Amino acid sequence: MRGLTTEAPAREQKTIHVHPRVDGASGAAVPAGEPRNQLEYIEQSRQAHSYSKGVSWLYDMALSYLGDAEQGNREGRPAVWSTGLMEAPLLYACDTVPMAVYDLGRLTAAEEASDLSSELFDMPKETCSMVTTLLGEWYMRRNNSVKKVVALSTVCEPLNMAYEMIKEFGFDIHRVEQVIRPVHGGEERLDAMVKFLASELEDVAVFLTGKPVDEARMSMEIKRMNRVMGKFRQIIKLRVANPLYVKSLPVLFLLMGSAHYFGKPQEYEALLDQLIDELTHAEYVPSPLGKIVPLTWVGARGLEFGVFKAVDDLGGALLSWFTPNPYDRIWREDIPPLEAMARFILDYFVTGSPVNQLKYIEQMMEETGSKGMFFYTYIGCPYGGMHVELFRNHFHKKGVPSSFLEGSWQVGAPSGQLLTRVRAFVEMLS
């Protein structure tokens, strides 16, 4: 693997020195301490990136995303709840804003959502914390938010049950039946699988608009997606030379936005252009410990923002990410758009065997010179846990250092045990 320099490159560079956090209203220094919720982590990260117009712009887009989509829906611009992983070309072709189910908890500070859900639905404590929290979030939005939901059946079985539970609050659920592409023996059936899934996706357009999708418009949206992903990959490459200019948490948010553009496609693409320009001309940001450890993140995208901060603070740099919305693959533009979407999904992290994904992770690690891996899944998620276990066994046999993290879909700081594991792993590789 190509190693990452642990110092500033030899060419002459200036160094950015990051100052202590300052309260924007009073100008007083903000006391050190762990943020209490996700919004405070975002604000802390914004202050740490005070030199970057692009990072501040990114957080503005992220924090206004769901509220703007809900307000637009009330004013007549349709929106729909969806996974927010790869539906953008289809939904935008239907003039509908995707509202990402999986980003809901990341963009709020509703500590009461999980407790409310447990009380209302008598949820067992073993229930996936993500599903429990989302049920509470939807309950709180039952009278003032978007009511349409596009549910992809193979993404998460507990979430499928949750969709049934929110029907009583007036949510209109449209299910997309999907198939899973096996590791072996599926090639002779692939065309039939693609045809079936393309038909299911066509039904989504009818659900949203009452008519088939405009295929010319969807083809344009696929071109946009490929263009956006190309710019995202450019940012990933630029970070290799200056990994802490844009730290781990904003990269997580960039990855989230690459799937749905935070409801504003043109603005999101302009944001990527801004960050590319910044990184191309950026002054070097040194590691607080004088060295940098390039790392790879595999699995769920995570809600416990303190984990990402701990990695950065110890000189770690998450330079490659293999999560449910992949940025390393290209949508086909030479076939009908619904077929292109079906084929993309069938080669996709959550609807195909994880064994098929190993080569992509290895390529990412090679390109970024990664020295180790974090495997992350949520407590109580056997589906994600099985995927991660297959990945971990493969890379363990190859001698790649790794750390397995089980996190919670919670608001607030990570557990001390989780942070201890993260710090010990980064320090070991240092």
Image (cartoon, grey):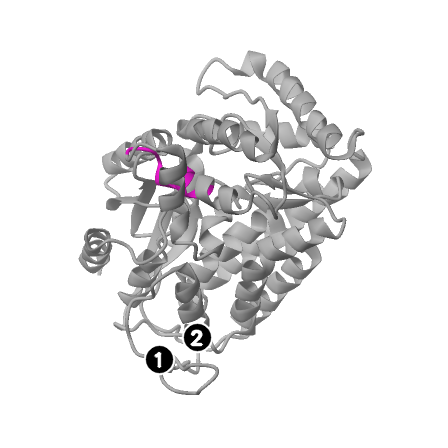
Picture residue at 51% right of the left edge, 27% below the top: 164
Q: Are marks 2 and 1 in contact (CB under 8 Å)?
A: yes
Helix, strand or loop at mark 1 = loop
Residue denoted by label 1: 30
Q: Residues within 10 Å of mark 1 (few under 14, many from 20)?
A: few
Residue 198 position within the rendered picture, expressed as x and y whole percent measured from the top left: 67, 24
Tag 1 or tag 2, which sits nearer the N-term? 1
Return the residue nearer the eye: 345 or 335: 345
Position of 291 with respect to 42 (left or right) is left
Q: Residue at x 43, y 75 (%)?
A: 47
Q: Amino acid at mark 2?
A: Gln
Regarding mark 2 in the picture, which secondary structure is present there? Answer: helix
Q: Is residue 208 above or below residue 236?
A: above
Which is nearer the eye, 17 or 302?
A: 302
* Residue at the disc numbered 2: 47
For the record, the magenta segment spans: 126-134
Look at label 1 and name its amino acid: Val
